[in-house]
Image: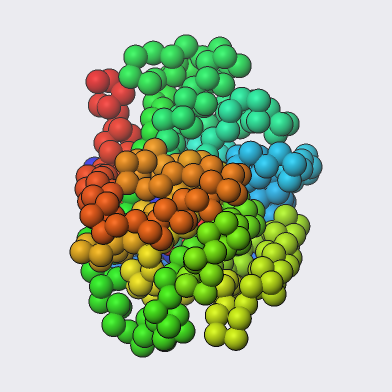
Amino acid sequence: MGKLVIVSNRVASAAEGKSTAGGLAVGVLDALKRQDGLWFGWNGKIEDPAQAGLSSYRIGRIDCATTSLSRGEYDTYYRGFANGTLWPAFHYRVDLSRYDPKEYAGYLAVNERLAGMLTELVDEDDRLWVHDYHLIPFARACRRMGMRNRIGFFLHTPFPAEGVLRTIPPHRDLVEALCEYDLVGFQTRGDAQAFIDYASRRLGLPLETGGMLRTRSGLVRVGHYPIGILPDDIQNKSKARSRSKLVATLKQGLQERKLIVSVDRLDYSKGLVERFNAFERLLESYPAHCGQVSFLQIAPPSRSDVEGYRHIRRQLESTAGHINGRWTELSWTPIRYMNRAYERSALLSFFRASQVGFVTPLRDGMNLVAKEYVAAQAPDDPGVLVLSEFAGAADELANGAIIVNPYDIEAMARALDQALNMPLEERLERHGHMMQLLKDNSIRQWRDHFLADLEPEAIAA
Ligand code: ADP
Ligand code: F6P
């Protein structure tokens, strides 16, 4: 069999271990460890098109081949249609989603250009695994260039219900483009069902047994493949860093206080303002926690040249400033809000040093941080996960996390109080459930399950 070719907009950095805030790069890198393959995508640079050749580097056994985007491509494809139209709509923020047909044309053109570059690197028997919303039309572009390889697609974000999807004017074209893949995978059963509903109702594609849609050119398999992590690796890393100077400094600053921790890209889908408000409500409604608990929010800026992101940043600064202004004492700052990325092992050690992981996106495909938080805990004294019901991870972790509605500030404050007061026995039981689940569905299972379903025999079965 040929090699595995991964295609994604963002490719892990050449400096292995360098922090990459974003589930795709982290997840795919973990999935590919100890496996040969080629990873193709954007190098993160904006350059003159004349310089947009391929640059190559290796991460372990993976060959990475990346190229730059021109200013126009970046503006239409990445900043425009992918992050100004698709991302907000896929996260149910239709109020932030705007549409410009020129941006859609640019999005399609970049997919064509990248597919053209990739044809040079692909052999007949290679398998292609394409990732995320930037590259929905990629298989169609490959097919037009004559590529007959098996091509699978995995969406890391939610896939919205029909009523929301239809707010994106070229919705039909996007779903038709997805039907050019051999396999289309989603994070949750609900996402896969939303896609099937649209394809069968709007496009009239018959659904056959085994989650297969019959199209004019053949069969497309549809499934859900919840992305996982490497729980043992995370456990080892968090333990190894737990005696570091960084953790000692963190603990010294806390002065025996409890710690609630959150880590996200600075994105409006992550529910950060609601979360800050819920922390303040905790202090108001449960005053015993005043001066006894600190909330650490780490949120490195992301996509800062898209207006929605600039707005959320300003809003958060003012919310954090307002809350701290009201509650801070000489010896206690309630919210520590930091806009920086940390090395992954440092983040994991912060998770281990905390009593509560507060993960409350308004919508999220999966949310790897929720899973990482659980895996990083000390097994004999684990912290508690407070998790939004609208994160894909809630489908799997509902047995052990305290599940909250991120729009319900009072309920989130109540959940924080419950988490901060939870007896050891209950924490152990909840953590045990979740850890078992993470081990049973690690990122290796995600990769193996998806790739097995991409094989032609899987269609025939
Ligand atoms: P998304 O893909 O929307 O960014 P996820 O929670 O699924 O959200 O994935 C985020 C990934 O990025 C996680 O693996 C997390 O550890 C990492 N990450 C998030 N914030 C930071 C940060 N401040 N520094 C370094 N890594 C981060
Ligand atoms: O699915 C999450 C995701 O959108 C990835 O596609 C992306 O790599 C990551 O978040 C970070 O965003 P960006 O690549 O736009 O910096």
Quarter of the image for residue 326 reads: bottom right
Relative image position of residue 53 (x, y in whole percent): 56, 64
Q: Is residue 391 above or below residue 379?
A: above
Q: Is residue 315 left or right of residue 134?
A: right
Q: Residue sitting at 69 percent across and 55 percent down?
A: 79
Relative image position of residue 194 (x, y in whole percent): 52, 26
Viewport quadrant of the C terminus? top left
Frontmost residue, 171 versus 217: 171
Frontmost residue, 371 versus 205: 371
Quarter of the image for residue 378 reads: bottom left
Q: Is residue 102 above or below residue 161?
A: below
Q: Is residue 246 above or below residue 282?
A: below
Residue 21 in sight here: no
Relative image position of residue 147 (x, y in whole percent): 45, 37
Frontmost residue, 363 versus 160: 363
Q: Residue sitting at 41 percent across and 30 percent down?
A: 189
Frontmost residue, 435 versus 14: 435
Q: Is residue 153 left or right of residue 280?
A: left
Q: Residue sitting at 47 percent across and 72 percent down?
A: 292
Viewport quadrant of the N terminus? top left
Q: Residue sitting at 27 percent across and 20 percent down?
A: 460
